Amino acid sequence: MYQISDEQVDYIIDDLRKNGIETDDLLNNLLDHICIIIEQDLADGKDFQQYYHTVVTRFYTRDIKELEEETTNLLTFKNYYAMKKTMIVAGAISVITLAFGSLFKVMHWPGANVLLLSGIVFFSLLFLPILFLLKVKEVKTTRDKAVIALSSVVGILFCIATLFTFMHWPGANVMRLLSIGISALILLPLYFFTGIRNPETRLNTIMTSVILAGVTSLLFAMVNLRPSTVYEDIRVNSYQLNETVLSEMKQQMLTSELPAETKAQIEKINTLCEKIKSIEKDDYPKDYVLREGSPSKAFFGDGAGIKLIAELRAAATAYNQTHAKAPLPIANSILDAPAHKLGHMYSNVALLNNITQIQLYLASTCCKTGMVYK
């Protein structure tokens, strides 16, 4: 049986420390295992150093320093492997649900929003935070930790912005612009100048930076900072033209007697329409020139505008029940929109124009059937 000398033990200790093993307990355990293997398997007269370097490769995959990293992680995180497993499961679930959610949304199948919501929550609130906690312990410099932290923040912000876009919640554009701004102005320069200083990572840093810059630029190009003024003016002019036509039709309508029930229905519908338009218009200053934007707060949540539109829907439905030959169009109009999404689906101009179109349709029907409008 081969006997290891004190000089050979010192050689093993020096080599392990030189290759990154700093924890005393880990060093002693490795030393014991290596010495036992050498004493059992090394034949007398064989080269000790050559056989030692053959034996030590059995303890790692890439290099022996990874044993030190694993030990540090285990000492730092008592639940390191549980966190790692949770991260992998969360990542797999998020990828699967996002893929199927995107497919369901494209195909207009039910359940798309639930899948997308689940995928984004798993990815942004579970996978990315755990990935940050695990990765930040693997680097030593403050700059590397800052890169990992900023990457996580940008990823979470962009995921939440995407979720807000899907759910038609306000603030999506602000968060998307914030994530792109942090990525372009802080994260990308920090990552580039941190990685390019290291000769080993210089090429990868340059290539990754080019890809990140390209993706960030494309994402910024997709952000609608402000609608085109040409198309905005067209929509505003269309509404104003409809208002002019409605005013002319009111004056040119034929006068004839109407049943009391029909007259009451027409007056109720038009009164509700004018109330809805006045709520939106009253939100502007007196000298305000109409521009396209979000509707007033009355058309969000349980606002007064939402309640008036619900009344208008009920009045239009009652009118259609007694005038089946010339019903008011409810489908694909503002009366058909879900109440909780109305403020997010329609701009102020689209809302006003939709209400005016309902009045125009009612006025044209009255003209054709000889009804009177007052």
Image: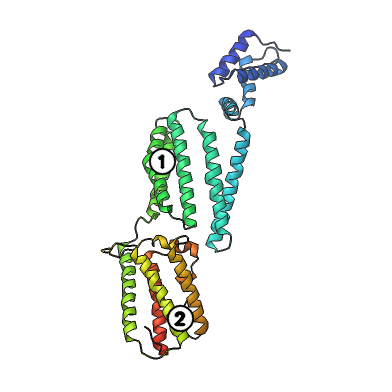
Distance, label 2 to label 1, CA atoms, is: 65 Å
> Which amino acid type is marked by label 2?
Gln
For label 2, the residue is 265
Q: Residue furthest top?
A: 6
Q: Position of residue 29 (x, y in %)?
A: 65, 19
Residue 126, relative to residue 70: is it above or below? below
Q: Is residue 24 visible?
A: yes
Q: Is residue 22 left or right of residue 291?
A: right
Please state which amino acid type lies under the numbered disc 1: Ser
Point out the tag, 2 or 1, that comes first from the N-terminus.
1
Residue located farthest toward the right when viewing the structure as drawn: 1
The reply to whether residue 331 is in sight is: no
Classify 10 Å Cα crowding around label 1: few (below 14), some (14-19), many (20 and above).
some
Residue ID at (59%, 46%): 92
Question: Residue under circle 1?
Answer: 209
Q: Which of the pair 316/327 is nearer the observer?
A: 316
x and y percent of residue 286 in the render?
A: 27, 64
Question: Residue 40 falls in which quadrant of the image?
Answer: top right
Mark 2 in CB contact with mark 1 (< 8 angstroms): no
